[in-house]
Amino acid sequence: MIMEKKQQDQKRAGDGFYPFREIEPRWQQRWEEQELYKTNPEPKNKFYILVMFAYPSGDIHMGHFRNYSVGDAVARRRMMEGYDILHPFGWDAFGLPAEQAAIKRNLHPEEWTLHNIEVSRNTLKKVGISFDWDREVATCLPDYYKFTQWFFVQLFKKGLAYQKEATVNWCEYCNTVLANEQVDAEGRCWRCEHTVTKRKLKQWFFKITEYAERLLNDLDKLTGWPENVKTMQKNWIGKSVGAEIDFKLESGEKIPVFTTRPDTIFGVTFMAIAPEAEILDKLEIPAEYKKDVDDYIQKAINKSEIERTAETGEKDGVFTGCYAINPYNSEKVQLWVADYVLATYGTGVVMAVPAHDQRDFMFAKKYGIPIKIVIHPEGGSLNLDEMTEAYVDYGVMVNSGEFDGLVGRDAVEKLTEYAQKHGFGRKKVNYRLRDWLISRQRYWGAPIPVIHCENCGPVPVPEDDLPVELPKNVENYIPKGRSPLADIPEFMNAKCPKCGAEARRDPDTMDTFVCSSWYHMRYVDNKNPDQPFSRAEAEKWMPVDQYIGGIEHATGHLLYFRFFTKFMYDLGWLNVDEPALKLFNHGMVRDAESRIMSKSLGNVVSPMELIDRYGVDISRLAMHFIAPADKEIDWNEEAFVGIERFVNRFYRMVKEADNPRPVNLKRYFKKDELSENQWDLYIKLNQMIKKVSEDGERMQFNTNIAALMEYFNALNQVKRIEPNFYQYILQKSAQLIAPLAPHFAEEIWSMFGYRESIFKSSWPSYDPNAVVCEQINIVVQVNGKVREQILIDSDASQDLIEKMAMESEKVGKFIEEKTIIKIIHVPGKLINIVAK
RNA sequence: GCGAAAGUGGCGGAAUUGGUAGACGCGCUGGACUUAGGAUCCAGUGGCCGAAAGGCCAUAGGGGUUCGAUUCCCCUCUUUCGCACCA
């Protein structure tokens, strides 16, 4: 097996094979010398292409390879179209694995990370992606995180960064706090897969909810974003419109509740409070209930996320012995504590209407709480004894005093107005989106630039004192439930910037999603020592014209990315309020059995291994050819065979071409300059150019390659081609394949005697006078079934086509003894005779 | 459960606004050239009937709209993805 592979590989190095081993490194070196990818500092016609940057693990995997190959194809195509390209790359370099490596290998996280960056960068260079490495950023370097901290300070100043005691997801194993999106559906940590529990900690949050409405509304502006991403964001933000109604305790204390259905308010028979809700402290729970309630709360809080959500359907709770008063009818309703109520949504209290909410219905049934019907379906009625589930649709209000007879949304409006008028309620919008918890009790992150002073409270570090540098002398990184920074007195002790008193730094670091929320802005001016970027540079390059990355960031990174951009717009730093015009999500690469590639499964295919065996370009082409870029791939190497044949054939054709030399590619041909066969090839060439251009625009690189193959098949059929025209064809073809196979294209380009890079040449345009053949095939249908084809001049009149169709023998067979009802013409394509 | 996307030959996939379903590639079959071929070239390749000409069927299944549906609408099934007690 191994022998076979080796023999094959040797063959690949032999005659008639495209010698990638020699060619690819040579062009990579020349491109570097020529500074081909250097960003024009004064772009006239800018195009900002951004691929999601990478965590430097020292390795690149198939997902990266696909991502950057797609990005590179776009960049190079635009380059040939004359755009000034910004195509940067960088490193999302903070994060957990560096600490784990530090623990395991006894290396400093920084040393390990910087080393990995070095390795990863060199690897990527071998892939020949057209990154401008002068624009590189690494989030773990002080010249970058200085401004990550700057963002924190700006947010703080605007009241958008705040601290609060919060029940947080806690991973025992990683010993750290996790954001909601870092906990999977089964309640496990996204990194270590251990079960997540709860803890109360004082944490920093960014008030992204303040931007919820804009993040939602502006989705409409994102016409270049895939619908599924926009839908996911919309659902994630989860806007719901309703009312906040103040119920009252017997003591007179208000309990506001959020509801989307004020029209059901006369059906409230109890209220349910989240175990973590603060309002519980205000209840005067009668002694005989006290113990049960406390036990229940303790149990509920200690339950893991899974336990609390797993048993879908079964709900439990405990009666507090307390009552609240419904402000609409002064009825007394029971107050329960129930863990199906979320403390973090609305006010943490639900007005329960068992007749018209399924959860409340089940709860009431279980505990024998009264159920009161207050909505009837329009034109129907409900009967309590027959109800097996809640009636949750809108309908006609009943048993609701003066409001009886009101219907649906109108009822909602009226009830809300009533509450507003009487001062016990108001219109209210709630979002599923929560504020963004950014504190991490870890070492390897950007320190939170805050000094805690006993007199002044939390004070942001003055901008001139940034960055707050990560101290290097950390004893150990083993997580122990608080940041390792807390144990470094030289770091922790500081003077209050406001009053000068002895104070202590915040020991936590920021979530790495903060670092990656603004890297697209840093690229435009990555060496600026004083500002995150200059307004002038941002004006030149922002927004990103095309953003490319995986779908997994749909509701995390891509939301934060938009949030930070809007924030900078509000501060006047940007004149755009959305970061990227177009977004493209490439599909995943999985193994042949549709499983995700992972080290533990041992099914990882390394792109570097492919590159070693087949070369970069064949690997890229094969990857593109297998499936359209947005589709997932179940990995197999079958496509390589066809691609390899095609590339070698192309290479041989160039090698064997007579008297190779640059020909005038700007010119178009006229019919009388070429033989009939060649004129036909010329038309096909122009059709292909059109197709490749259009498909490439839609990121359809698979059909792009197919079009070239198809054309070469046609080319092969024609025996005699005049050398000048033949080279015209091959050179245009080289240009068309250049974005997908840059080294190969560059090599054959130079074989034709070009001195300048193919990427400095102009993307082929098609001859508009030569995309339609003189003779076209018209399909003749009878009653929608194809019966005949007519080859006819493309400018033939409809009458003539009709005449020929009717005279056709085959058609005759199907219309004899029938009456022709009508004839439908589709110009240039088809004629359909409808006969009965 | 809710939301979204998808389902096409033996396989990966084409078909841009409804207009020849299966481009291109793999694989397979036959042939040419060869000492040899896993190189290269040529031809064939959805199913059924037929010697052929040709015909019929076929884009998950069922219905509908239309002269015409892989494409639009409704129902069912399956798969993938996202959210999962959001009041």
Image (cartoon, rainbow, N blue to C red):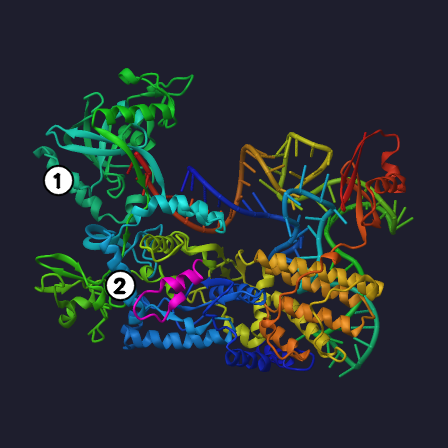
Q: Is residue A712 visible?
A: yes
- Rounded to the nearest angstrom, the CA distance separating label 2 from label 1 is 37 Å
Residue A500 lies, in percent from the top left, at: 9, 64
Query: Mark 2 or mark 1: which comes first in sequence?
Result: 2
Residue that carries the numbered disc 1 in the rendered image: A281
Q: Secondary structure at mark 2?
A: helix
Look at the image and say whether residue A404 sits in the magenta stretch: no
Quadrant housing the N terminus of chain A: bottom right
Give the image location of residue A743, x and y in percent: 59, 75
Q: Quadrant of residue A376?
A: top left
* Residue A624 relative to residue A249: left or right: right
Image coords of residue A463 (percent x, y): 23, 64
Q: Chain of mark 1?
A: A
Q: Which mark is residue A44?
A: none
Q: Nearer the viewer, residue A791 or B14?
A: A791
The amino acid beneath tag 2 is: Gln
Marker disc for residue A149: 2
Q: Secondary structure at mark 1?
A: helix
Q: Residues within 10 Å of mark 2 (few under 14, many from 20)?
A: many
Residue sitting at 71 percent across and 71 percent down? A664
Q: Which residues are magenta?
A: A523-543
Q: Nearer the viewer, mark 2 or mark 1?
A: 2
**Residue A525 is covered by the magenta coloring:** yes
Apparent side of residue B39 relative to residue A447 in the rendered image (left or right): right
